[in-house]
Amino acid sequence: MSGHSKWATTKHKKAVIDSRRAKSWAKLIKNIEVAAKLGGADMAGNPTLYDAVFKAKKMSVPKDNIDRAVKRGAGIGGESIEYLSIMYEGYGPNGVALMIECLTDNKNRAAAEVRTILSRNGGNLADPGSVAYNFTRKGVIVVGSEGTTEDAVMEAVLEAGAEEIEPHGDGFGVITESSDLVSVRTALQDAGIDYESADVEFVPNLKVEVDASTARKIFRLIDALEDSEDVQNVYSNFDLTAEVQAELENDDED
């Protein structure tokens, strides 16, 4: 799993979640637009669009916003979108590796903003390839624990191509080859198991455990990056022990 997924184990204050909802929706809309542009507006024939729309619905993005994004991306009605997809590699506090995925209409703005955020938060940009070698593109399906068990999830997905199941927040993360994402997602649906999202992500090959102090710095950096309108996703190779997670959860309760 991407290290950032571990942040799901510590609860953000409600006010912080609410204040970021608009930015979260904007990023989900971008995903829909790009998916529709690349594969067309028919979700039956465009699994990437299906997953982008599904995730947006799970995040309560209004249907009208979703429909407009699909049409805009597919060029229906004369509107069009043009985003550049750029991947920046970097290091955070204590040398933690970062993959920073951007969708932007202004490459120079995105590069300057990413560089500034990194430098202000104890990180720096890395040379292309110096971080990417430690990550592999994988399918990641997030399943909530409510109404199901790890054994039920495993039974549903094992023969469909799932590689492993990991703890993910309060639920599970099902890891697949990127090419098997749709078949594994379909197997969950056929088994009547609800899931929260199905995405292709950068998953670290080697994780690095960090202490609570370093984790706090990494979270501040990732939060700052995700506040940028150009940054779509941030992946990292940090890992948290149960003890560190407990300490961070205590921070939130203070």
Image: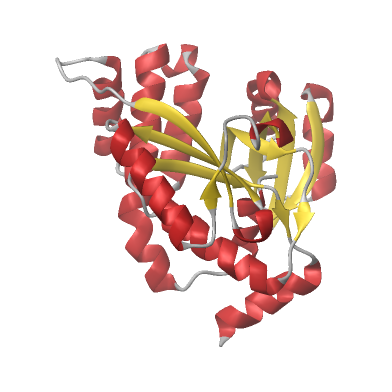
Give the farthest residue toward the front.
127
Residue 16 pos. (x, y %): 40, 68
Residue 248 visible in image: yes
Q: Nearer the viewer, residue 8 or 124?
A: 124
Residue 146 visible in image: no
Left or right of 37 in this view: 142: right
Coloring basis for residues:
secondary structure
Residue 62 pos. (x, y %): 30, 43
**Quadrant of the rendering where the C terminus is positioned:** bottom right
Residue 244 pos. (x, y %): 74, 72
Residue 49 pos. (x, y %): 44, 24
Q: Quadrant of residue 134?
A: top right
Give the farthest residue toward the bottom.
254
Residue positioned 24% across, 29% down in the render? 68
Q: Nearer the viewer, residue 119 or 217?
A: 119
Give the farthest residue toward the left.
78
Residue positioned 41% across, 46% down in the render? 114
Q: Nearer the viewer, residue 207 or 47?
A: 207
**Position of 17 relative to 133 (above/below):** below
**Quadrant of the rendering where the N terminus is positioned:** top right
Residue positioned 53% across, 62% down in the render? 122
**Position of 89 relative to 162 (above/below):** below
Give the mark count. 0
